């Protein structure tokens, strides 16, 4: 087993050549200094074989953009027309577009929040000029309710006296 791992070299020779290295203070780890031999059934020879992946793009990280992805790419100015968008896009392009969209939405939300704050400040200052305070509004509301309650009491008293 060790002969297969270390390429038929004795352990002392591997230590001198630097095959062992420190890995962030976690102890000794093995680092291969010799290339893997290419045998007929090895993984390296199968990956390098042109007949294995004929007609396919090996290790491509692409996908078809959805309608929403296309709209986002157009809105961000990545493409001018929908016909310019290729059928397959890399995931990195789509993630970058989504991140830019997220940032723009955050900027819009910040602007709307600031506008709302300014509107509240302006309406508060206008209320002070009209002398509309919460105490005054609540006192008027309670006086109105008392008057309505008094009218109802009188109506109830008038019905009970009539028979």
Image (cartoon, rainbow, N blue to C red):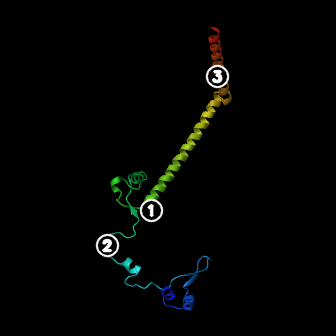
Q: Residues within 10 Å of mark 3 (few under 14, many from 20)?
A: few
Q: Nearer the viewer, mark 3 or mark 1?
A: 3
- Label 1: which secondary element: helix
- State the residue at coordinates (62%, 14%): 155
**Residue drawn at point x = 64 percent, y = 11 percent:** 160
Cα distance in 3D space between marks 3 and 1? 64 Å
Q: Distance between the residues labelled 1 and 2?
A: 25 Å
Relative to 96, does residue 108 appear above or below in the rendering?
above
| Disc 1 target residue | 92
Q: In this view, does 151 lie to the left or right of 36?
A: right
Q: Mark 3 points at which residue?
A: 145
Which percent across, then down, holds residue 68? 41, 51
Q: In which quarter of the image is residue 121?
A: top right
Give the residue at x 41% y 80%: 44
Question: Which one is earlier in the sequence, the residue at label 3 or at label 1?
Answer: 1
Q: Height in image: 64 above or below 27? A: above
State the residue at coordinates (41%, 79%): 43
């Amino acid at each position: 087993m060790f002969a297969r791992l270390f390429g038929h070299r004795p352990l002392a020779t591997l230590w001198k050549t630097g095959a062992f290295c420190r890995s962030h203070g976690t102890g000794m780890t093995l680092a291969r200094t010799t290339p893997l031999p290419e045998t007929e059934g090895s993984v390296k020879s199968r990956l390098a074989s042109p007949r294995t992946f004929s007609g396919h793009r090996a290790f491509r990280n692409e996908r078809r953009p959805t309608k929403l992805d296309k709209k986002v790419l157009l809105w961000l100015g990545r493409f001018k027309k929908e016909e310019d968008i290729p059928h397959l896009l890399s995931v990195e392009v789509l993630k970058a577009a989504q991140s830019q969209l997220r940032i723009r939405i955050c900027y819009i939300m910040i602007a709307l929040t600031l506008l709302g704050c300014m509107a509240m400040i302006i309406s508060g200052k206008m209320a002070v000029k009209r002398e509309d305070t919460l105490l005054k509004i609540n006192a008027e509301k309670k006086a109105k309710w008392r008057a309505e309650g008094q009218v109802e009491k009188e109506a109830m008293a008038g019905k009970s006296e009539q028979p």
